[in-house]
Amino acid sequence: MGEAKRKRQRREQAAWPHADDFRGTIDLHMLPPAATINGTRIRELTGDDTIPDTQQIILQAFRAVVGDRTFHVGFCLGNETGFSAIGIAVIDRLMMETPGAALHVVPVAHQDIAWDIVLRHLHSFTGQVLLLAFPDSDVYDAGTAEKYYSKAVQLFDDKGKQLERLTAGQRQKIREQKAAILNRPPPPSFYAAFGVAQEDSPWIFRLTTPAGKVIRTAVWGGRRNYAHEFPEDIVRWVGGDKIAIVQVDSPVGVNRRSSLDLTHKLAKDFDGIIHWARDTETFQSILKSFIYPARPGIDQSAGASRRLGTGDHDPGS
């Protein structure tokens, strides 16, 4: 009986994000289209005169209700430096709902953990406006498609009618249609969102090493070539008297490089570890080594986001 109980506990620990199930269902209500957001408006926002004069723009912008929290969230193509033309329009639509609010941007670089990152932020976000940006259509699909069939999400149209979840057969048909598409269109141009400042916060994990030591480790994105240094507060978020800072120049997971394994080794001599990634791709490869595939003993304490704007921010604990 003792061994069976231990195996059950290990399975429960490994079933990430099993621990989030108690947070309840996420309701996503599509925002009604805005007549003022058209081709002319997008040309004005991007400075790109080649954008067609389209009158009706379909935007992935929602009002999210999670428990007693309500905020606005959008999905678009983009990265740590800019957004597609439609992405710029999504930002414009979100800011119509909450003028002057800070815009928290989460770049999602890796396809195989895209939905994990999206779901974690939808569950834990405490701000007013959230934008999830994906570098290409494959990562975009991986990070957005599941909201149409996940049991964690209820989707409503702009009239308030709840949409039915896609069935397994419908999803298979969509995958077949995507596979049949050959000549893909070129990737869109990305444009800077002018007039906003950027602020980042790390992902913070609490984990138990094989030796039984409990420590906290943070993953910090350098955006591009360590373009910004991590704040002094990151030391407080990790905690401890002796903290190791590891600069990571290239994605991990290659040649058996694992940030989780390195954390276990450094934990012998340090109270906390900070992994400082050179760029977004490296940043999310480190996250992948912690959360995919799931391993026992890991507990995420805070999510990664980039904020555009001003105001106070609680990074979590």
Image (cartoon, grey):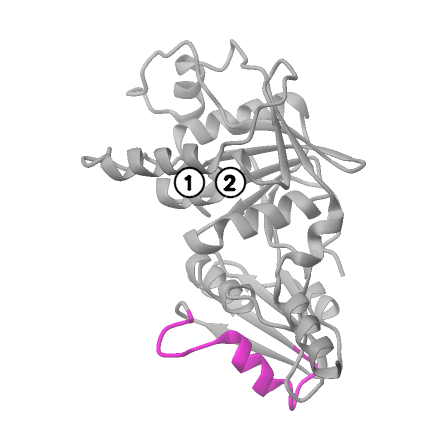
Residue 163: x and y in percent read 58, 23
User: Can you say which quadrant of the picture contains the C terminus?
Assistant: bottom right
Q: Nearer the viewer, residue 256 or 147?
A: 147
C-alpha gap between disc 1 and disc 2: 8 Å
Instruction: Check disc 2: other Cα within 10 Å, few if <14, some if 14-19, many if 20+.
Output: some
Residue found 58% across the figure and 71% down from its top = 295
Which mark identifies residue 146? 2
**SS for dot 2:** helix
Mark 1, mark 2: which one is toward the viewer? 2
Q: Which residues are magenta?
A: 252-272
Instruction: Check disc 1: other Cα within 10 Å, few if <14, some if 14-19, many if 20+.
Output: some
Residue 72: x and y in percent read 65, 31
**SS for dot 1:** helix
Which mark identifies residue 141? 1
Residue 257 part of the magenta-drawn span? yes
Q: State whether residue 162 is above or below residue 172.
A: above
Residue found 53% across the figure and 36% down from its top = 149
Residue 254: x and y in percent read 36, 73
Residue 308: x and y in percent read 59, 41
Q: Nearer the viewer, residue 80 or 107?
A: 107
Residue found 74% across the figure and 56% down from its top = 316
In the figure, residue 229 lies in which quadrant? bottom right
Circles 1 and 2: CB distance less than 8 Å?
Answer: no
Q: State whether residue 290 is above or below residue 281.
A: below
| Amino acid type of the residue tagged 2 in the rendering | Glu
Residue 212 appears anywhere in the view: yes
Choose the circle earlier in sequence order: 1 or 2. Answer: 1
Which mark identifies residue 33? none
Q: Residue furthest left?
A: 183
